[in-house]
């Protein structure tokens, strides 16, 4: 069985979808968050998954080393970035095969504000992308994408929620 580590920063609905998938042939060995108050930590604990918190440091190189060392000790075959709101170091992504879920149809709308950017651009559809993480920001090879229509009256919250509904199934399929 393959071993995976999940990286997550917030509520954890993507992580929960991965944890809940009964057909997943991957063992989730740990969940790491950069925020001690992230709800995703409780979701992991309730599922019997080991958790680690590695909060951002004022010295970025110290944080990069701490997360690299922590993941290295867990010996994963795959790292899954599921709502992890940090850019991983080049050393990290060269060391561990890492996938990420992004709420847009890459290469359109990379970065932290993809849903807002799609709405501001006036496009009729956006979506979600699962991609390999490389040294750029949302520039890695695309694994899977699904389109989501932008509806009249959509705002950032409503559109993001519809994207997340699709994203949860897509990340499980990609893993």
Image: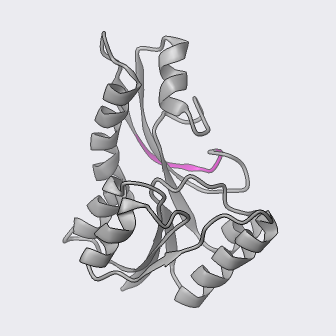
Give the residue displayed 31% in from the left and 35% down from the top. 161
Q: Position of residue 66 (x, y in %)?
A: 68, 78
* Residue plotted at (66% across, 64% down): 56
**Residue at the image point whose x is 53% and y is 87% from the top:** 74
Protein image colouring: one colour
Horizontal and vertical percent position of residue 107: 60, 34
What span is colored magenta in the figure? 139-145
**Magenta stretch holds residue 132:** no
Whether 174 is drawn above or below 2: the answer is above
- Find residue 99 and report its horizontal and vertical position in percent: 52, 60
Tell me the quarter of the image containing the N terminus. Answer: bottom left
- Quadrant containing the C terminus in the rendered view: bottom left
Please name whichever residue, 42 or 50, is drawn nearer the observer in this view of the structure: 42
Q: Position of residue 41 (x, y in %)?
A: 38, 69
Left or right relative to 144: residue 111: right
65, above or below 93, in the image: below
**Is residue 40 toward the left or the right of residue 65 in the image?**
left
Q: Report the residue at 77% width, 62% height from top.
A: 58
Q: Quadrant of residue 38?
A: bottom left
Q: How many numbered markers are drawn? A: 0
Does the segment drawn in magenta span residue 140?
A: yes
Up-down relation of residue 164 to residue 174 (above or below): above
Left or right: 92 as drawn, with respect to 103: right
């Amino acid at each position: 069985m393959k071993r995976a580590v999940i990286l997550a920063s917030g509520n954890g609905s993507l992580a929960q979808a991965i944890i809940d998938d009964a057909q997943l042939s991957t063992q989730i060995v740990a969940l790491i968050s950069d925020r001690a108050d992230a709800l995703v930590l409780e979701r992991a604990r309730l599922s019997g998954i080991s958790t680690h918190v590695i909060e951002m440091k004022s010295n970025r190189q110290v944080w990069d080393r701490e997360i690299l060392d922590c993941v290295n000790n867990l010996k994963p075959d795959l790292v899954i970035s599921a709502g992890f709101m940090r850019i991983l170091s080049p050393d990290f992504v060269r060391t561990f095969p890492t996938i990420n879920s992004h709420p847009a149809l890459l290469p359109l709308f990379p970065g932290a504000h993809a849903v807002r950017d799609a709405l501001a651009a006036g496009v009729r559809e956006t979506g979600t992308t699962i991609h390999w993480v490389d040294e750029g920001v949302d520039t890695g090879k695309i694994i899977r994408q699904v389109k989501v229509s932008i509806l009249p009256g959509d705002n950032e919250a409503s559109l993001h929620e519809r994207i997340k509904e699709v994203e949860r199934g897509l990340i499980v399929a990609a893993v």
